[in-house]
Image (cartoon, grey):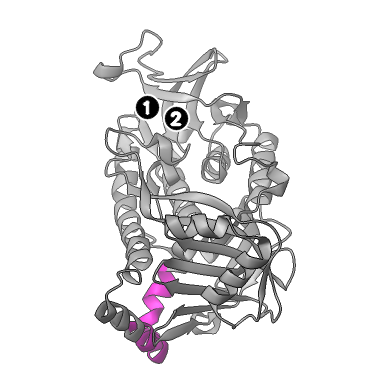
Amino acid sequence: MKNDEFDIAIVGGGPTGTALALMLAKLAPDPTRIALFHHDDVGRYGYQATLDPRVIAINEGSRIVLNDLGTWPKKFQAIQKVHVSQRGRLGRTVIDPKDFKVEALGHIVRYAELHSLLLGAAKRAGLTVLMGDTAVMADGSQSNQKSDLAQDDFPIVMTQGEQTYRSRLGVQADGMHNQQGAGNTPEPNAKQVALLGCAVASVPRPGWAFERFTQDGPLAILPHPDSVATQSVVWCCKPEQAETIMAMSLAEASSALTQAFGDRLGYLTLTQPLNRFQLYQSLNPQPVKGRIVAIGNAAQTLHPVAGQGLNLGLRDAATLTHCLRDWAANPTRSPEKSLNIYDNLRKNDRQITSKLTSFMSGIFTTGWSPIEHAAGLTLLTLDTLPFLRAPLARHLMQGLRQ
């Protein structure tokens, strides 16, 4: 075969796309036949990757996947308790790993470290990693995208800069801005944006993760891999409130953060200015089209509440790998049946998780007292009756597995 032809092409070298490539490499007779197109994001957010402030919550199911791939970070912070509360209203609940006979409810790792480990493993596995400009994928066999470059055996066409490649099957894992189909690109969340950063707690509680719902949006304070006292801050709030906070001095912003969160960790001192990120949410109703399948943020974009985005994407990757197991051994056959099976298997988990995060991010921000009191009563009921909170906790830890 030519060096511009592949069995599988994955556009998007983020954690989800790279994890998929590593999973498929274990099945493929020749891992070089799997191409991973990666656009380097260094400088995309205005700082080097080593200074990337983002951390990411990894649930137990995802930890097992990453550990099996040999990409589990050395630095992590286990979540031993999850405290959920509502500011100014009655009700709270605490989720404990002992209720589910697991050592931890999840782990917090640095996004940059995890991403670096995955890319390094991809290169060592013999995959064809193509660094460069953002790659564009199209199904050349579709009538409205007919391309002279497409061939019957290699209908998927990727363009990266001046280079053109072909593939038997294509995977879009390049994030929310490339969801397939008209009308599927996520719209910005007009009600909330996210402010991310780190803070030091004067009274740290090792292993505790807090989800504090306010009328402006959820505020998560998570344990940080760097130290026991360091906390990761994910502060979702209204755009106008974010503008006000971003204009504050570090001391003023620290005071506002502590006031919004409460005194469970003492005083929270921000270690650096907060970074603002636009929030999006959408669910692509048709992630499989012909021989192209979208996974991760290219298929669904979630609100960061409960930290389900990457975990859902890794479940996409694991299920797709399972469905392509037989096809990967003989890729000259048509993959359509395998892709249709994948689509059906992932439908319920994608829909439930998307609706759950949307509901959680909005139910406490209605501004209507009866609803907010009812939500607080629900939290109190969950805390009193463990068997009621078990399904929610298990879904957050593992997702819907089939």
37 relative to 350, above or below? above
Q: Is residue 163 found left or right of 92 in the rendered image?
A: right
Front-most of 388 and 112?
Answer: 112
Disc 1 marks a residue whose amino acid type is Arg
Q: Position of residue 7 (x, y in %)?
A: 48, 26
Q: Is residue 310 found left or right of 345 in the rendered image?
A: right
Q: Mark 2 and mark 1: span between their CA atoms?
A: 6 Å
Residue 335: image quadrant is top left
Is residue 304 visible to the viewer in this orientation of the structure?
no
159 relative to 61, above or below? above
Residue wearing tag 2: 330
Query: Over which residues does the magenta segment extend?
Result: 378-395
Tags 2 and 1 touching, CB below 8 Å: yes
Residue wearing tag 1: 333
Residue 349: image quadrant is bottom left
Q: Quadrant of the C terminus?
A: bottom left
